[in-house]
């Protein structure tokens, strides 16, 4: 059975010992719960892929606690450093070219054998303490079965991965609720690979022009690029103005008329509140809807500004044709 730890210092240290010995530990960040292992240990990283059922071509984000440590592994460009000072620790992942002069190597499994690496410094004390106590960079995708709804509580992780991983640190609900923004700086023009907790508008204020990539199924160069992802078992229908009798409703703002099963991401149309609730409410509607014999989840439209861009990205992928 998977051990459940609190976020006390002594239990974080126990979890770090598991990491150092090649184990896998789920832990909360400001975005979602991550599934962490020593990024320099190939056997440990392989355990992440097995536990999630994650395709090997999909690389992982490598998490660090300190900026100086991070730049020992990736090339420190002027723009990367400026973004790091502005947004780290925080919900931004940068894709940078790997350095070749560091004697300590990140497992090539973690980077899917790419010359680039996705890196970030998380903005929770628990996550950074776990990295510091383990004395290792930690590879960590979301702590859920691959392609399914990301976990925003420790209970979500336990429901999916009990008996598959060594431990879970329960640090409470995640504050942002959607994954980090991924920005690729390995190209001539900065490219947004995945919208997330840091808005495109905030990044543009520093980067200027940013190209926007779209979800794909091949030639993956970073996490978060699969077109079908974050998917409940029930089909998802977007931008709805009515709800069928056999559908649940995921509402935003003033809800459309519906007397059946429903959840409102934010009755006040607050995008930050909606992001925090997104994955938990999708999980609830999926589980309750299946129990009631419903056939789908209808989702109201959400403005694609600020965090709304990330919310719409996750919902679009949840509604995409399922991969097998």
Image (tube, rainbow, N blue to C red):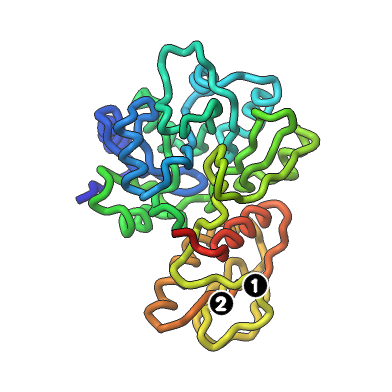
Left or right of 85 in this view: 158:
left
- Element class at badge 1: loop
Q: Residue furthest right?
A: 208
Residue neighbourhood size for the residue with mark 1, other residues' Cα within 10 Å, grouped as few (<14), some (14–19), many (≥20):
many
Residue 62 lies, in percent from the top left, at: 47, 32
Query: Residue 319, which numbered label?
Result: none
Q: Nearer the viewer, residue 60 or 226?
A: 226
> What is the C-alpha distance between the residues marked 1 and 2?
8 Å
What residue is at 50 percent from the left and 36 percent from the top?
122
Residue name at image x 35 percent, y 57 percent: 155
- The quarter holding residue 287 reads bottom left
Q: Is residue 313 left or right of residue 27?
A: right
Q: Quadrant of the C terminus?
A: bottom left
Label disc, if present, on residue 249 of the rendered structure: 2
Q: Position of residue 88 (x, y in %)?
A: 58, 32
Relative to 225, say whether 113 is above or below. above
Q: Residue furthest left?
A: 1
Mark 1–mark 2 contact, CB under 8 Å? yes
Q: Which residue is mark 1?
A: 300
Quick one: label 1 or label 2, which is nearer the N terminus?
2
Residue at x-position 46% and y-position 55%: 147
């Amino acid at each position: 059975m998977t051990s459940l730890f609190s976020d006390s210092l002594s239990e974080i240290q126990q979890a770090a010992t598991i990491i150092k010995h090649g184990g896998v530990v789920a832990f909360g960040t400001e975005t979602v719960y991550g599934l962490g292992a020593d990024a320099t240990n190939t056997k440990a990283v392989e355990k992440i892929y097995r536990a999630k059922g994650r395709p090997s071509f999909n690389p992982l984000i490598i998490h660090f606690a300190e900026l100086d440590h991070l730049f020992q592994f990736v090339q420190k460009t002027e723009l990367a450093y400026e973004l790091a000072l502005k947004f780290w620790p925080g919900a931004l992942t940068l894709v940078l070219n790997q350095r070749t002069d560091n004697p300590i190597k990140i497992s090539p499994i973690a980077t899917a054998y790419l010359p680039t690496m996705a890196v970030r410094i998380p903005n929770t004390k628990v996550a950074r303490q776990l990295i510091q106590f383990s004395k290792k960079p930690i590879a960590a995708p979301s702590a859920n079965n691959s392609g399914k709804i990301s976990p925003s509580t420790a209970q979500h992780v336990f429901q999916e991965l009990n008996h598959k991983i060594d431990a879970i640190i329960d640090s409470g609900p995640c504050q942002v609720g959607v994954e980090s923004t991924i920005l690729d700086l390995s190209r001539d023009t900065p490219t947004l690979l995945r919208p997330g907790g840091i808005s495109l508008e905030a990044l543009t204020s520093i980067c200027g022009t940013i190209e926007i990539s779209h979800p794909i199924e091949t030639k993956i160069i970073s996490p978060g690029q699969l077109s079908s992802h974050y998917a409940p078992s029930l089909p998802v229908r977007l931008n709805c103005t009515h709800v069928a009798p056999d559908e649940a409703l995921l509402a935003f703002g003033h809800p459309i008329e519906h007397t059946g099963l429903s959840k409102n991401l934010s009755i006040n149309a607050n995008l930050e509140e909606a992001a925090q609730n997104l994955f938990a409410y999708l999980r609830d509607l999926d589980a309750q809807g299946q129990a009631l014999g419903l056939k789908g989840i209808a989702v109201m439209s959400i403005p694609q500004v600020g965090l709304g861009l990330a919310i719409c990205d996750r919902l679009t992928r949840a509604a995409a044709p399922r991969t097998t």
